[in-house]
Amino acid sequence: MIRVMETDFATPLPAPELAAAPTRFDERRQALLAAAAQRFNELGVRGATLAVIAGDVGLGTSSVTYYYRRKEDLAAACFEQAIALHDDLVGRAAGEATLALRVEALLVALAHRLAEIDVGRHPQFLQFNDIRALPQPHLQRVFGLYTVWWRRVRALLSGPETSGWTRHDRNARTHLLVSVAHWLRVWIGRHEPDDYARVARRVAAVVLHGLNAGGQDWPDEAGHGRAWQATAASAGQEVFLRAATELVNDQGFRGASVQAIAERVKLSKGSYYHHHDTKDDLVVACFERSFALLRQALVAAEQSCGNGWQRTCEACAALVRLQLSAQGPLLRSTATSALPTPEHRREARRTQMRLTERLASLLVESMVDGSMRPHDPAVGAQVLAGAVNAASELTRWVPGLEPSDAVRVYLRPAMLGLRVPAR
């Protein structure tokens, strides 16, 4: 497992190149990077092939190797390009005078770039969810660059209101902001591209100010002791589903081999095929398990006592605790590229949308009873969904954090606002 160290990486981020007239080689290389980013986003780093990417730009596979010898070299170049783009956004935001202005500037600048991509003015950039699918030595270099960028985001969170933050507080809140920014790409396409910047300002308002209407206590024990109902037909199948979920989250679908899953649970490959006919069936079952657990938390919150704020805290806290428990994690929502058919992918995304809408209905009820401040519940639900989705990786960025503290240092700022004083 890759851990974030507190010493700076020696490897700097790529410096921006001086403007020069592009050569034919440069134009072909940029076209190749754009096609590769789109395919890697769609199929995963391990799922896309050089042959398919080459065909997208009208080249033969042997011609692609003139620019990048192996697919891993091409994927690493796509990641480095995406990191440089995001570093430019952070650089623009860093010039603002306050923490609040810097956070809003970062999210709005990202929304502008996403709008330009969606109207065809810029090519897609590679999303970061598959970084750990890279082999060495690519992984060390790319993840090192990404971590330098992550620390630059952390530097945006400075100001008088952060003086009481511990290292855990600062890293957890940085992970929250980064996760919300990455999640924006997943759902902002529901809006018109010329409205992206306004949506991003609403996101920033939720991130900075939270959802509490004021006077509502923070429930430290929210989600504690939640009894989860098993979703698999047998204990053995449940063990396989958890192991497969961990590996798909960490290595992508192709990296989560049947052999690796079996080794993780110390069983034979024959035991695996006793529960699942193919690996495709297993990934579908992993999604069904994660959706069932999400649904359990929401239904329990809907049926519980208390006002809307308390019920929303209960649902989100239960899910964050689950992510870091022995019963977790949930399958990352971005793992939809691992599903075997377009119909499976469409159905998974439809279910994700419906569950997020169900969370939004809790926020509406909270505004009606006065326990949450007025806000756009569709945006609020996406912020919380992104935070829950990323909670499984929290201990990567907050080394030494006890899972029992995750609700306090991570979910509490998500619900009360990034600038809430630390405990």
Image (cartoon, grey):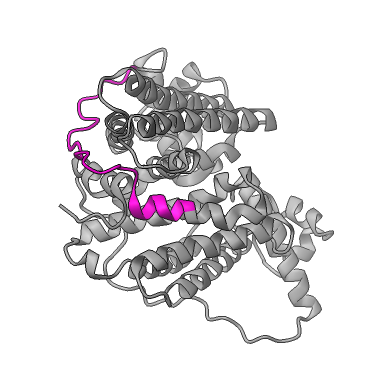
Q: Looking at the image, is 120 positioned above or below residue 301?
A: below
Front position in the image: 333 or 52: 333
Res 211 → quadrant = top left
Front position in the image: 385 or 74: 385
Q: Main secondary structure of the magenta part?
A: loop
For the magenta stretch, what is the residue range? 202-229
- Measuring 69% from the left and 61% from the top, which residue is drawn there? 123
103 relative to 310 in the view: left or right: right
Using the rendered image of the protein, determine whether residue 47 is visible from the camera's viewpoint. Answer: no
Could you say where residue 291 lies in the image, as x and y percent from the top left? 46, 26
- Measuring 62% from the left and 33% from the top, which residue is drawn there? 345
Front position in the image: 410 or 80: 410
Res 365 → quadrant = top left
Could you say where residue 244 lies in the image, as x and y percent from the top left? 44, 33
Residue 98 is covered by the magenta coloring = no
Could you say where residue 104 lies in the image, as x and y percent from the top left? 44, 62
Label count reads 0
Q: Looking at the image, is 205 positioned above or below residue 403?
A: below
Front position in the image: 145 or 95: 95
Using the rendered image of the protein, determine whether residue 149 is visible from the camera's viewpoint. Answer: yes
- Measuring 28% from the left and 27% from the top, which residue is drawn there? 307
134 relative to 173 in the view: left or right: right
**Most distant residue in the top direction:** 233
Res 420 → quadrant = bottom left
423 relative to 334 in the view: left or right: left
356 relative to 363 in the view: left or right: right
**Most distant residue in the right direction:** 58
Q: Looking at the image, is 144 positioned above or below residue 179?
A: below
Could you say where residue 220 lies in the image, as x and y percent from the top left? 17, 38
